[in-house]
Each structure stands twice: as C-alpha cells, then as structure tokens.
Image (spheres, grey):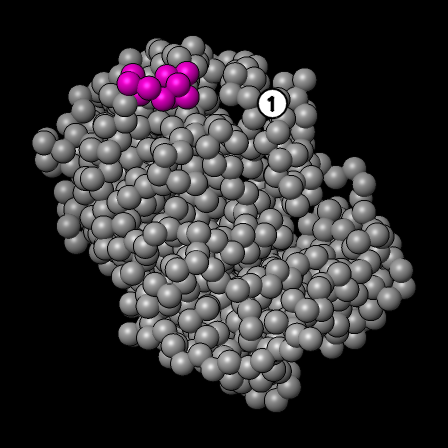
Amino acid sequence: MAFARKTTDSSLPDDPLHLYRMLAVTNRGPAAVWGHQQDVLRAWHQKKSAAVDVSIELPTGAGKTLVGGLIAEFRRRTARERVAYLCPTKQLAQQTAAAFDEYGIPNALLIDRVSSWNPADRARFESADAVAVSVYSHVFNSNPAIKNANLLVLDDAHAAEGYVAKPWRLSISRQDESAYLDVLSALEPALDPLVLPRLRKNDTDKAFRSYVYLASPIGVAAHALQLEHAVGSAVEGGKFEGKRADESRHVWKFLQGRLDRCLFYVTYGQIVIRPFIPPTWQHTAFSDPERRIYMSATLGDGGELERTFGRKKIERIPVPEGWENQGTGRRFFVFPELASDLAADRSELPAFVSSTISEAGRAVVLTPDTRTHDSFIKSMLPSTYSVLKAGDVEDDLTKFTARQNAALVLTNRYDGIDLPGDDCRLVILAGLPARGDLQERFLHESLGAVEVLQERIRARILQGSGRATRNPQDYAAVMILGQSLTSYLSGRDVQAAMHPEVHAEIEFGWDNSRQYDSANMTDNLRVFLEHDDAWAEVDGDIVRERDKYTRVVAPSSGELQASVRHEVDAWQSIWNNQWDWALTAVRNVLDQLQGERTPRRYAAFWNYLGFSIAHRLAQQTSEASYLATSAEYFRSAQRMSTGTSWLSHLASPSDKAGAPSAPQLDELDEAAMRGVISRHKEIGTDLEEHATKARAGLAGTEYQAYEAALVVLGQLAGTSESYGNDDDESPAAPDAVWIFDDTRWIIWEAKSQAEAKGMVSPNDVRQAGSHLRTVETERGKSAPSDSFCVLMSPKPGVMPQGRALADEHLYMVGPSPVLEVFDRLLRAWRTARGRSIPSLAPSELAEIFRAEQALPSQWMPLLRTTPVRQR
C-alpha cells in the first residue's frame, strides 16, 4: 500500500535568485539568470516586495516570463500564498505554462471553460501547491473563477485595457436593431437633436457613421429610469443574438442600477455604455489580493497603467540601465506609400503589397478595426492565400505556421502571437492602432486628446512590429500601410519617444523608403530576408544610430501622471454616488492639468465632467453656488475644446437647459484684441511705415524681406509674440512664429523664392510639419489645441510622397491669401486708430475688426483652406 506522507522541507529560498539556483538542479531552462534579470529581481525583493501594486518593465526578449515566474514561485514557497499568473490569451497562457515546466516551477494551467478544468489542478492552486496559469477573463468576470488569490501577476499589462474593462462595458450593436433603437430612443434627451434623426436613418453617409458622440451625462442622469428599463428589457428580453446575449447578461449584472454613473458613447453602428475608469476597486477578485505585480514590455509615463487597472498608484521598477538600448532581433521597416512610383499612383499599391506577401510566404497582418481588416483581405492579399483569423490559431499556431501561403489577419490584436524564426518573416501594420472601443475612439477622434493615448498607440506599434522577432537572432520585415500610420511614424517626436533600437530602425526604414521606387524597395527586402553579408554591412548603420539615441518622454506625460490618482478618486466617488467628493476630485485633476505642457483637450473633457457633476449637485441641493460652479466649468470646457466639435454635439435638450450662455467673444478673438491694444504702444505712430515695408515684403519674393513681413503681419494680427528666424545657421527653424497667449500658435514655413510651377518636395513638407514640435521643444510646453503650421509656396501642388508625410496640422497657402489677410488687418487698424485704440475695450475693438473680416476667427480659414494631405 502507498500512502501520502508529509515531509518537512526547511530549505526555503532566501530570495528569488536563490530559488532559481535551487530549481536549476532539475529545470530545463537557462543555465543562469541573466544580469538584467538579476537586477530586477533584487530591486523587487529588496525595495518593493511589500508594495501592494508594483509594475516591472522588461522589453520583449528580456526574459519577462522567468522574472514573473520566479517572483510568483518565491511567494508561493515562502509565504504559502495562492498565486495566479494571468495572461491575455489562452495561447499565451499555454506558452507560459510550458516555460514554467522548463524552469521547474509547479503550475496548474486553468483556461477554457471552468467546467472543463481538472479538479486536481484547481485544488493544487487553491492549496498553494502550484502557481495557477490562467487568463484575465477568469478574474475580470461577473462570476470570477479565480477569486481567492493572495498574489496576482498580470502579464502584458500594457495591453490589458480591453480585458480589464470588459465586465463593465456593455456594447449594443446595430445588428441587434431592436435593442439599439430602443436605447437610442431612451437617449433622445441626452443627444443633439440634429444628430438623432441621422442615427436612425439607414442611408446615412459613411463619414457620419464613424463619428463617436458622447451622450450628455446630465441627460443620462435625468432619464436614468427610462434608460434602465430600455437596457434591461433589451438584455433580459432576448434582443441580443448569439454570443452577444450571454455577454450582455454578464455585464448587466455589474451595470444595473448604475447607468447614471456611466458614459454613453454613440455611433451609427453601436452604443457603448461604460464607466470611464473600470471600478476594479469593487471587484474583490482583483482588489482583495494582498499584492499585484504588473509585467509589461513598456510601462509608459502618463498614467496609462493606473487608468487601465483603476489603481491610484502603481510603483515602478524600470527597465535596467543599458537594456533600453538593446533590441530583440532586427526589424526592417518599409513604407510603401513613400516609394516614388507608389506615391504617384496609389492604384499600384495593392499589387506591390500582394507580390511582397507572395515572396515572403507567410505574413501576419495587424489592423485596428474590422473595416481595415476586411478591406485588406479584399484588395491586398494574393488570391491563392489562405486567410486565418484569431480564433483559428487560439489553441494551435501551427494551423498558420504549417502552411506555406497563408496570412494571419488580426483586428486590434497587437500582443499574444509569437512567431519566432522561420514561422514568419513579414509583419504588416495596416492603419494607426487607435481604434479600440468607442471610448478610445472618442478620446482620439472626437475629443482630439491624443496625448492621453500616446503611450497606448506607441505600445501597440512596438508590440505589433515585434510579433516575429522574439529573440536576438530573429529578423522580420515590417510593412507600414495607411496614411495615418505613415504620417504618425514620420514624426521626429514620435520616433524619439520610442526605444532607441526601434527609433533607429524606423528612421532607417523611412530614409530608405522615401528616396526610391518600389523596385528598389523590393531589392532591399530581398537583401534583408537573405540576411547575409550584404545586410550585415548596413545593419551596423542602425546600431550606430541606436547608440546615439536616448528615449525622450512625450510632452504632457508629467501632468497626466500627476493627475491620474485624482482621476481614479473621481470615478470611485462617482461610482459610489458621492457627488460632492467627485467634484473635489475633478478640481484636483484640473489642478494637475494646468502645467506648461497641459493637454488642453483632455482638460476640456474633465471640465465638462465638472460641469455635469456640479449641475447634478445643484439639482440635488438647490444651492445656487453649484450653478455658478457648473457655469465656470462649462466655459472652461468651451475654451479648451476650441477646434473640435464634440462639445457642440452635446447640444442636447438636457445640456441646453443647464449650460450657461456662451461668451459673446471667441477666446482666440479676445486674445487677439488684447494683443492689438498692447501692440498699439509699439507700432501705433509708425503704422504706415511698417505697413508699406511689410506689404512690399509679402508682395515680393526675397526671402529675408518676406520672413520679416510675416513677423509684422503677426503683430498686426494681435499676437502676444511674433518672431522669426534670426539665425542663418539654423535653416530648419520656422520662418515665423505667432503666439496668441495660451489659445493658439501659428507656425510658418515660407518658400517665397520658389517658382509658381512644379510640386512642393517631401523634404519641404517634413520640414514645415516638424516646426510645431520644434517650437514646443524651444518653449518647453505643448502647443494649444488646434495650433497649426502654414507652408506658404507659389507652387500649385505637392508631390505624392509629400502628401503621404503631411501631418494633420499642416496647411498650404499661396501668396495671395496672405496678402488678403494683411489688407484686412491694415484696414481694421486704420479704422481703430481713428477711434483711439487705447480707449477701446476688447469687445468694442472686436466690432471694428469684425466689420473688416479681420478677427482671427474670420481670416484663419483663408490659411486653412487646403490641408497638405489633400493638395
């Protein structure tokens, strides 16, 4: 007979490194822990082991799984803790469990449906005899299967937002038409009456269909009972089909009774209901564990991790010094839309992409949305290719890797697919990865608060481009498609915010794409994929450039990091129905968003939330002070959202009843009128002399006279500062910079000596487009919302490669509109001088300028008629 006998093992490890030496007797993993891994493990054990929330940054290929596994096993052995190691997908969980087996770490793989779990494996986790390896959905669930862990290790935390928010995110698709229309009707008081009929029509144009509207929180609160009934009837009345029915029932358990504390995002095809920050603090499966460790390839600097997980503060163990300049394998970026022939004739692009895929064999294609996904399959893939999707390879990647001619096409899935070695040599990123759920699309497209998503976008690009480079010996080509992504990666500031290795790779690829045709690009790809001595010669160029670079923190990251703890505070208070506390937290958020690099449009959103909360408190308490506070927040939201339409689309009946009347004078126009009054002291008596010289400069072609005249034009426009490039040694600097206090910047690149024929070159486009970032660097702050650059040139058009590079904020104008602006301003100045400018209030001065069409809001459209992208 055999009986289980208890044994006493007194040889507990002193630290995770000692643990690995103990495991090394039987494990099949690396012979030793690498130096940078040792640094991270020591940092955790000596400084952070008692911390409740700790994040560890280790790039792909740096041995992140071993570090996380050793910490998990150390706590299991020494403290007898139940430890769950969570991965985003089943595939990654299986890979992690296999790695733990090699390391000698006892583990229980708990994936798939709970009913299919091996009871013995589950018991091993619950008795702390093994580390559970599972997926996020088994914790973030209305009925979590893993709910009694002492320690959670959350792998790939940078990509977890969708998994974490899912239990509180109810999506109502237009496919479930009855449910969609019922909820849309209940939202009527909270939506712009001009928008609502178009949402109901079946023949709405495509541009309208993609716009994301935010329903008025005031209207949602006032009609919460009707919304509860409409949503509840849809969920419980069988109005959802298939899998959507089960998902909606699970989410409804979390949202029922709290719809007035959620945001409603509405598009033609979908309604999404969710809190802005997931209330994980009330989800015991996540909040009860004594500790949480977040493993990530990139942590970011703007509070992204805290917003994702609803935590006020997550302590950080950064990537070890020196490792940031090390790469994992080699990526060769190619930008087909910059090739001279493909930029001139975009109709040839699909054939080039198709032939490149055919030559490479297998390809993984990453798209941000289903529309891009479907379009790529239809127009870019070779007709003979097999197309696989995420579900096809969830359990077995060999369904893809065993086929010679296959494309794995994924939507919004930039993590979780590892294709090392010959598994795949071509990765295609098609489109800017900023189209997640409707909240993300609202922040990026409707609100224009790109700053708060920058780390998320960069992480997706970094992770997506590394799907086929999983170890130092790997190599893969990365094809960049889509004007938005091509333009984004062309930005010097974007490249500088990447890890130095990726920065050097992108810059190398950009330089070698824009100067040649597609035939040359194909030759370069062949050299790279052969990966012999010919490539080794140029690979050294990338390494040398990499060693020159240091990653630059993106503007406004400091403010966003400082504000995030108060953002979580605010949403905790909202979720708990504590509106007075929520209002205090909103004020604290905005106090942190008032630095020199303030992300104004994100601050506009929080001001609008402050307006909604204060208005709600006014209704609850009947205190007049809350009405005054709500009016202040609303006006701040108006000022900070200049240049966007999201606030005007909140012209719902509910908002109109609560919002104060808009100020009569636009913020920018008021700043300009203050500038005119101030400038009068400098140029008032010499106006005609200045005007004669400046107009001659603007009518001529000599570059120094033209640039000097632009500075004078800026002074007449009412800038607080107008200056030019006085340093001939800095030809890349802007030719003129106009600053209108904190409301708007206008940056000029003037090509006055160019002939009125031919096309503007890509170099001129890139130079002009970079000026906004140059001025931000010089002034140490982010540009105000809706600031832009003007490229003045008499040339009739822009080369196709230039259009592909153009930023959204770059416009092209000829000499005549500039003269028109000058003449309007001069007429207004002459009239105003006759009325004595110093004696006029800004509003009175504005009436004079308005009569001459000389307010910024009137002349600015002349400069912005033609975006360079459309020239």
User: What count of labels does the image hold?
Assistant: 1
- Which quadrant of the structure image shows residue 521? top left
Residue extending furthest toward the front: 1
Q: What residue is rendered at 48% in x and 74% in y?
A: 76
Q: Is residue 527 magenta?
A: yes
Q: What residue is rendered at 44% in x and 48% in y?
A: 459
| 615 with respect to 782 (left or right) | right
Q: Which residue is mark 1?
A: 404
Q: What residue is rendered at 57% in x and 37% in y?
A: 367
Using the rendered image of the protein, determine whether residue 573 is visible from the camera's viewpoint: no
- Which quadrant of the structure image shows residue 202? top right
Query: Is the stretch drawn in magenta largely helix, strand or loop?
Result: helix
In the displayed structure, 378 sits above or below 521; it is: below
- Please provide percent x and percent y for residue 305: 45, 63
- Is disc 1 placed on a helix, strand or loop? loop
Q: What residue is rendered at 11% in x and 37% in y?
A: 726
In the displayed structure, 630 sits above or below 359; it is: below
In the displayed structure, 477 sits above or below 796; it is: below
Q: Is residue 54 magenta?
A: no
Instruction: Give the magenta range.
Output: 526-535
Is 418 in front, or is 580? 418
- Please provide percent x and percent y for residue 92: 56, 51
| 54 with respect to 323 (left or right) | right
